[in-house]
Protein backbone atom coordinates (compact mmCIF):
# COMPACT_ATOMS: atom_id res chain seq x y z
CA UNK A 1 0.00 0.00 0.00
CA UNK A 2 1.33 3.47 -0.94
CA UNK A 3 0.11 6.71 0.58
CA UNK A 4 1.05 10.16 -0.77
CA UNK A 5 1.02 13.23 1.46
CA UNK A 6 1.72 16.70 0.10
CA UNK A 7 4.00 18.41 2.63
CA UNK A 8 4.29 21.70 0.77
CA UNK A 9 4.69 23.54 -2.46
CA UNK A 10 6.64 26.44 -3.91
CA UNK A 11 5.63 28.73 -6.75
CA UNK A 12 8.62 30.39 -8.37
CA UNK A 13 8.36 33.08 -11.01
CA UNK A 14 10.77 32.24 -13.81
CA UNK A 15 10.00 35.24 -16.01
CA UNK A 16 7.01 37.56 -15.88
CA UNK A 17 3.78 35.58 -16.27
CA UNK A 18 5.62 32.25 -16.25
CA UNK A 19 5.71 30.22 -13.05
CA UNK A 20 7.27 26.96 -11.97
CA UNK A 21 5.31 25.00 -9.35
CA UNK A 22 7.19 22.54 -7.14
CA UNK A 23 5.24 20.04 -5.02
CA UNK A 24 6.94 18.03 -2.26
CA UNK A 25 5.48 14.68 -1.20
CA UNK A 26 6.14 12.18 1.56
CA UNK A 27 5.31 8.64 0.48
CA UNK A 28 4.52 5.91 2.95
CA UNK A 29 4.78 2.31 1.78
CA UNK A 30 4.01 -0.72 3.89
CA UNK A 31 5.46 -4.10 3.03
CA UNK A 32 2.63 -6.45 3.99
CA UNK A 33 4.90 -9.47 3.98
CA UNK A 34 7.20 -8.33 6.78
CA UNK A 35 4.98 -5.54 8.16
CA UNK A 36 7.64 -2.87 7.66
CA UNK A 37 6.91 0.73 6.73
CA UNK A 38 9.30 2.67 4.49
CA UNK A 39 9.26 6.35 3.60
CA UNK A 40 10.13 7.91 0.27
CA UNK A 41 10.31 11.44 -1.13
CA UNK A 42 8.93 12.81 -4.38
CA UNK A 43 9.11 16.17 -6.13
CA UNK A 44 6.76 17.15 -8.94
CA UNK A 45 7.50 20.16 -11.13
CA UNK A 46 5.24 21.77 -13.67
CA UNK A 47 4.96 25.15 -15.31
CA UNK A 48 1.75 27.08 -15.78
CA UNK A 49 2.16 27.24 -19.55
CA UNK A 50 3.09 23.58 -20.00
CA UNK A 51 0.98 20.51 -19.25
CA UNK A 52 4.08 18.31 -18.94
CA UNK A 53 5.14 17.35 -15.45
CA UNK A 54 8.65 16.41 -14.31
CA UNK A 55 8.71 13.90 -11.43
CA UNK A 56 11.56 12.44 -9.39
CA UNK A 57 11.18 9.94 -6.56
CA UNK A 58 13.66 8.36 -4.20
CA UNK A 59 12.11 5.21 -2.77
CA UNK A 60 12.78 3.52 0.53
CA UNK A 61 14.88 6.27 2.08
CA UNK A 62 14.28 5.27 5.68
CA UNK A 63 11.97 3.53 8.09
CA UNK A 64 11.88 6.68 10.27
CA UNK A 65 8.93 8.95 9.53
CA UNK A 66 10.56 11.80 11.45
CA UNK A 67 13.77 11.62 9.39
CA UNK A 68 11.79 11.45 6.13
CA UNK A 69 9.67 14.48 7.05
CA UNK A 70 12.82 16.44 7.97
CA UNK A 71 14.37 15.52 4.65
CA UNK A 72 11.32 16.54 2.60
CA UNK A 73 11.19 19.81 4.53
CA UNK A 74 14.84 20.48 3.63
CA UNK A 75 13.94 19.93 -0.03
CA UNK A 76 10.98 22.30 0.32
CA UNK A 77 12.86 25.02 2.20
CA UNK A 78 15.58 25.05 -0.46
CA UNK A 79 13.21 24.86 -3.46
CA UNK A 80 15.02 21.77 -4.74
CA UNK A 81 13.94 20.72 -8.24
CA UNK A 82 13.55 17.13 -9.45
CA UNK A 83 16.78 17.27 -11.44
CA UNK A 84 18.93 17.96 -8.35
CA UNK A 85 16.90 15.96 -5.84
CA UNK A 86 19.06 12.81 -5.75
CA UNK A 87 22.27 14.78 -5.22
CA UNK A 88 20.76 16.87 -2.41
CA UNK A 89 19.39 13.77 -0.67
CA UNK A 90 22.77 12.06 -0.98
CA UNK A 91 24.52 15.06 0.57
CA UNK A 92 21.91 15.31 3.37
CA UNK A 93 22.12 11.63 4.32
CA UNK A 94 25.93 11.62 4.14
CA UNK A 95 26.06 14.65 6.46
CA UNK A 96 23.62 13.08 8.97
CA UNK A 97 25.29 9.65 8.98
CA UNK A 98 28.96 10.65 8.71
CA UNK A 99 28.66 14.21 10.05
Image (cartoon, helix red, strand yellow):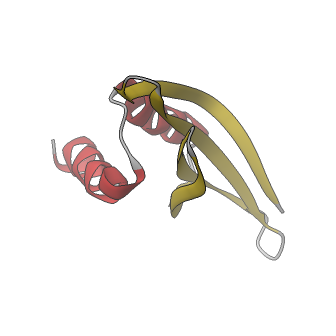
Q: Residue at x 45, y 31 (%)?
A: 18
Q: Residue at x 51, y 58 (%)?
A: 54
User: Which residue sits furthest left?
Assistant: 99
Location of residue 64 with respect to 62 vertically, above or below: above
User: Which residue sits furthest bottom?
Assistant: 33
- Give the left or right position of residue 45, taking residue 98 as reference: right
Q: Residue at x 36, y 52 (%)?
A: 85
Location of residue 94 with respect to 17 vertically, above or below: below
Q: Nearer the viewer, residue 33 or 4?
A: 4
Q: Position of residue 66 (x, y in %)?
A: 55, 34
Location of residue 34 with respect to 76 vertically, above or below: below
- Give the left or right position of residue 13, taking residue 8 as reference: left
* Quarter of the image where the C terminus is located: top left
Q: Residue at x 43, y 38 (%)?
A: 71
Q: Position of residue 70 (x, y in %)?
A: 46, 31
Q: Position of residue 91 (x, y in %)?
A: 22, 49
Q: Position of residue 32 (x, y in %)?
A: 84, 70
* Quarter of the image where the N terminus is located: bottom right
Q: How many marks?
A: 0
Amino acid sequence: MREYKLLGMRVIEIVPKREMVLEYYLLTETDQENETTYYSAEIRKHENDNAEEEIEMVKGLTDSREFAVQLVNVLLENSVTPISMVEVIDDYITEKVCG
